[in-house]
Image (cartoon, helix red, strand yellow):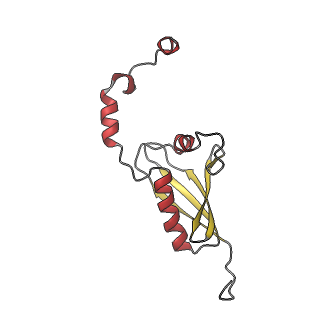
Amino acid sequence: MANGLARRRSEFSFTIDVRPPFRLDLTVWALRRRSVNETDQWDGNAYRRTIHVGETPVGLAVTQVGRPEAPKLSVRVSGDARHARAEAAARRALGHLLGLDLDLTAFYAVAAAEPPLDGQHPVRTAALIR
């Protein structure tokens, strides 16, 4: 290192409260819609991605610990970046990547008024096959 002090590899965790409803699995599915996407990893439980904090690569592992109606994400950060900088960068990146800052209240209101989207009408598979 330039100053002669070697940084230790560190790992820490924090949580993010998310606006409901939210499902990490479906959100990551949308990110990974292309089979060649090797950046966004999903193992059925955790979303993993590497981001950069300055020039330093930092690993993120995100799991959903709350129900869709009361969502909360647990984020584990690993790498050589300083704690405060890495957490701020992870919060920004996840906010953007997972759409955590989007308020979809107006969309849900419109969808609730549309019969095929209101959850009250079963999907008619025969109509979809035609």
**In terms of depth relative to the viewer, which is nearer, 18 or 125?**
125
Where is residue 83? Give x, y as percent: 56, 73
Q: Residue at x 53, y 45 (%)?
A: 24
Q: Residue at x 46, y 54 (%)?
A: 96
Where is residue 87? Give x, y as percent: 52, 67
Q: Residue at x 59, y 65 (%)?
A: 52
Residue 108 location, quadrant: top left
**In terms of depth relative to the viewer, which is nearer, 55 or 91?**
55
From the viewer's perspective, is 1 left or right of 126?
Answer: right
**Quadrant showing the N terminus:** bottom right
Identity of the residue furthest to the bottom in this view: 3
**For residue 42, above or below residue 120:** below
Q: Residue at x 63, y 51 (%)?
A: 39
From the viewer's perspective, is 4 left or right of 127?
Answer: right
Q: How many marks?
A: 0
Where is residue 111? Give x, y as percent: 34, 31
**In terms of depth relative to the viewer, which is nearer, 81 or 118?**
81
